[in-house]
Image (cartoon, helix red, strand yellow):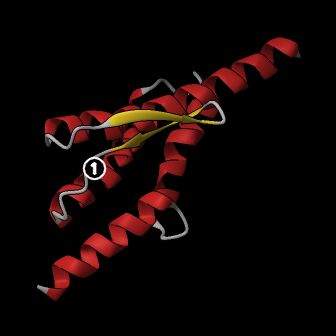
C-alpha cells in the first residue's frame, strides 16, 4: 500500500516538473530569459514578457504536448502520470494561469 502511494506521489511530482520543463524549454527557445521559481516547494517558470502575443501563446500552451505521452506510454504503465498528462487539457480554460494567458493572447491577436 505504501509503495502504491509513493508511486502515485512520484508520478504527480514528475508531471508537475515536466509541465514546467515544457514552459522553460519553450521560453528558452524563444529567447524570453526563463527562470525557475519555487513557491512552497512547487516549481514555476517565469519569463520576460515582451508583449508578443504569439510567443506568450506558444509558451503557455506548450505543456499540452504532454497529452501525446498518454499515447506513447504503454497502457498499463504509470497510470497516474498518464492521467496527469491528460489533465493538461484543463490548462486551456481561463480558470488556470496558463489558460488565462492563452485566452488573453488569442483575444489580443484577434483584435489586430
7 left or right, relative to 39: right
Eyeballing the image, is 69 above or below 93? above
Residue shown at 57% from the left, 21% from the top: 77
53 left or right, relative to 7: left
Whole-percent x and y of residue 28? Answer: 20, 35
Occupied quadrant, residue 19: top left
Can the viewer see residue 70? no
> SS at mark 1?
helix
Q: What quarter of the picture does the C terminus occupy?
A: bottom left
Occupied quadrant, residue 67: top left
Residue shown at 38% from the left, 31% from the top: 21
Q: Nearer the viewer, residue 95 or 69?
A: 95
110 left or right, relative to 76: left
Whole-percent x and y of residue 1? Answer: 89, 16
Residue shown at 33% from the left, 54% from the top: 61
- What residue would you read off at disc 1? 59
Whole-percent x and y of residue 93? Answer: 48, 68
Whole-percent x and y of residue 110? Answer: 18, 83
Furthest-bottom residue in this view: 111
Label 1, residues with CA under 10 Å away: few <14, some 14-19, many ≥20: many
Q: Nearer the viewer, residue 94 or 33?
A: 33
Eyeballing the image, is 52 above or below 41? below
Amino acid at each position: 500500500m505504501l509503495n502504491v502511494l509513493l508511486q502515485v506521489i512520484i508520478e504527480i511530482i514528475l508531471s508537475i516538473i515536466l509541465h514546467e520543463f515544457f514552459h522553460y524549454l519553450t521560453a528558452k527557445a524563444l529567447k524570453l530569459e526563463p527562470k525557475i521559481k519555487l513557491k512552497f516547494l512547487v516549481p514555476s517558470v517565469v519569463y520576460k514578457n515582451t508583449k508578443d502575443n504569439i510567443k506568450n501563446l506558444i509558451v503557455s500552451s506548450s505543456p499540452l504536448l504532454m497529452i501525446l505521452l498518454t499515447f506513447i506510454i504503454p497502457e498499463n504503465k504509470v497510470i497516474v502520470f498518464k492521467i496527469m498528462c491528460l489533465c493538461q487539457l484543463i490548462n486551456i480554460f481561463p480558470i488556470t494561469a496558463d489558460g488565462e494567458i492563452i485566452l488573453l493572447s488569442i483575444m489580443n491577436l484577434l483584435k489586430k
